[in-house]
Image (cartoon, grey):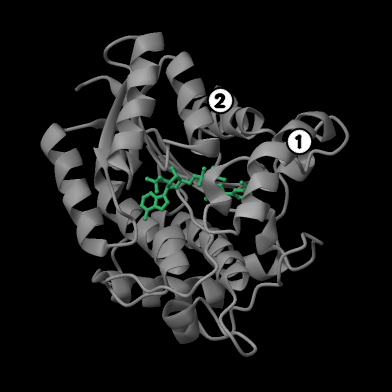
Amino acid sequence: MNRETVLITGGNSGIGLECARQLAKDGRRVVIASRNLAASEDAAEALRREHGEDAALALALDLGELSSVRSFVAEVEARDLHLKALVCNAGLQGIHERASPDGVELTVAVNHLGHFLLVNLLLERLRRHAPARVVVVSSGVHDAGLTTGMPTPRMDDLDALFARGGSHDGAYNGQRAYVNSKVCNMLFTYELVRRLGPDSRVTVNAFDPGLVPGSGLARDYSPALRFFWDKVLPAAASVVTHLTPRVNPAWKSGQALARLVTDPALEGVTGRYYPSHTRWEEARSSEASYDTARQRALWDLSAQRAGLPTTAVG
Ligand SMILES: NC(=O)c1ccc[n+]([C@@H]2O[C@H](COP(=O)([O-])OP(=O)(O)OC[C@H]3O[C@@H](n4cnc5c(N)ncnc54)[C@H](OP(=O)(O)O)[C@@H]3O)[C@@H](O)[C@H]2O)c1
């Protein structure tokens, strides 16, 4: 397995699958890492049929369980993957409050903490194969300054973030946990860049796909909402995307995500944000995401929760 490889979490569905498809088309070997191994095997098999026997591999990874992240990394090490890029794409949005086996609210566990541990444990391998890239899939909903139809993020209490996805006024709000987890993606990106230092040959950038109906993200929603999301909105998105860059079919966002991995013009470019509303030109993220004290505090607490020293990088 010496061919240059891109690892993509959640590459068996939605935006990740379209990204994997584009990467394979561009001649990259893709490792699809998701919880549902059968779905990942199907996706990898389809890519192999189109792009050759060596084009794709599926591996099991449950980002909601720290021990699974560690076993997954052990498998990557055993296979000695020639890792050139890591796309942190997997994500979930729930309605009901659930905790990971490690006692962390599940949205934060999967969207943030699992990726935090994964990236930290794979950094040495990325450095060895540098120049190498990390791309973190966030969302425009991280930005309280934008009207997105989602709750505004609340990151005032990091203990509450890990325990319940953030502070809620009253009952648990899965959408608030989700937007908070997407703020975490931004804070993590910027703090990692600072810890890697200006001379690092591993670059780290963040991405927002825009609203992408039809993906698996609504899997916890009611059948009526899911029908609308799966069957009605995707056709509308293919038309509406010509009018607004904020709504996109999965293939379009997936291809834009793949570009952050492959575009030679982005060699050495780090600590940037590529949102859909600029058609993925570099832009500023929310003001709050540049709060270095918040970035550090999240890093330190995440390291503690993931069982890493707070000085793991840098
Ligand atoms: N769709 C949108 O409108 C939208 C907007 C902004 C941002 N995003 C972001 O885009 C990314 C991709 O989402 P999507 O819309 O393409 O949704 P999706 O089709 O549901 O894809 C999510 C992927 O994450 C994987 N996943 C979920 N839980 C996991 C876990 N515990 N461990 C490992 N993998 C897990 C899923 O695989 P399994 O089947 O194996 O669980 C699936 O492949 C997410 O980060 C999401 O927050 C989406």
Q: Which residue lies most toward the bottom here? A: 170
Query: Which of the two residues, 227 or 215, is positioned nearer the viewer here?
Result: 227
Q: Residues within 10 Å of mark 2 (few under 14, many from 20)?
A: few
Tell me if residue 51 comes above or below residue 93 in the rendering. Answer: above
Q: Residue shown at 60%/54% (left/top)?
A: 223
Kindly identify the amino acid type of the residue bearing the numbered disc 1. Ala
The residue singled out by tag 2 in the image is 263
The residue singled out by tag 1 in the image is 237
Q: Which residue lies most toward the right here? A: 243
User: Residue 58 occupies which quadrant of the picture?
Assistant: top left
Q: Position of residue 148 (x, y in %)?
A: 77, 59
Q: Which residue lies most toward the left here? A: 78
User: Residue 80 occupies which quadrant of the picture?
Assistant: top left
User: Residue 292 occupies which quadrant of the picture?
Assistant: bottom right
Q: In the shown orientation, is residue 158 left or right of residue 179? A: left
Q: Position of residue 311 (x, y in %)?
A: 30, 69
Q: Residue shown at 34%/61% (left/top)?
A: 64
Nearer the N terminus, badge 1 or badge 2?
Answer: 1
Quote the CA–CA distance across marks 1 and 2. 26 Å
Kindly identify the amino acid type of the residue bearing the numbered disc 2. Asp
- Quarter of the picture containing the N terminus is top left
Q: Residue shown at 52%/65% (left/top)?
A: 184
- Quarter of the picture containing the C terminus is bottom left
Q: Position of residue 134 (x, y in %)?
A: 44, 43
